[in-house]
Amino acid sequence: MKLDYKISENADYLNEITNHPDVDLGGGFPLDFTPLFNLGITYEYDGGCVCYVNTGYGVYEAHTQALKRARGKPLRDFISWTLEDLFKNKGAQAITSYAMHTNPAAKKLSREFLNFDRSDELAEYYKLNREEYLCRR
């Protein structure tokens, strides 16, 4: 069920979510994600967002943030919707992401939607290309 999913018009919601105490990527210091917002497409829903940063022709790197109340099934349904829109309507050729080894929840979420690519001492890296996505449908 689609619950008010949309493409963000500005970076305000992305900044609100990423600076919320549930997420707090800045360790208590406010961060401005406007530069990331300006490099791609940000989708939002009640309590979360995914910023897909364009890193090359049709390649987007996913950055997911969600409040505790918006995780689980709502977040997974939302991610599925964003991937469908990217591959079907936005010409995406591949989605990449990474998860730090210190964040097992992010690794689990990445594995659910993307394919494991490689690992190093800091993180695991994931990728899903257009053909792989279409084969899953």
Image (spheres, rainbow, N blue to C red):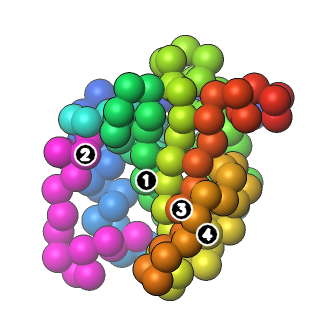
Q: CA distance from mark 2 to mark 3?
A: 19 Å
Residue ID for mark 2: 36
Relative to residue 117, is residue 38 drawn left or right? left
Quadrant of residue 32 within the rendered picture: bottom left
Q: Between disc 3 and disc 4, whose residue precedes?
A: 4
Label 4: state its secondary structure: helix
Q: CA distance from mark 4 to mark 1?
A: 12 Å
Whether residue 99 is visible to the viewer of this picture, yes or no, is yes
Residue interval drawn in magenta: 23-37
Residue ID for mark 4: 107
- Name which residue type carries label 2: Leu
Q: Between disc 4 and disc 1, whose residue precedes?
A: 1
Q: CA distance from mark 3 to mark 1?
A: 12 Å
Please tell me whether residue 49 belongs to the stretch shown in magenta: no
- Name which residue type carries label 4: Lys
Whether residue 12 is visible to the viewer of this picture, yes or no, is no
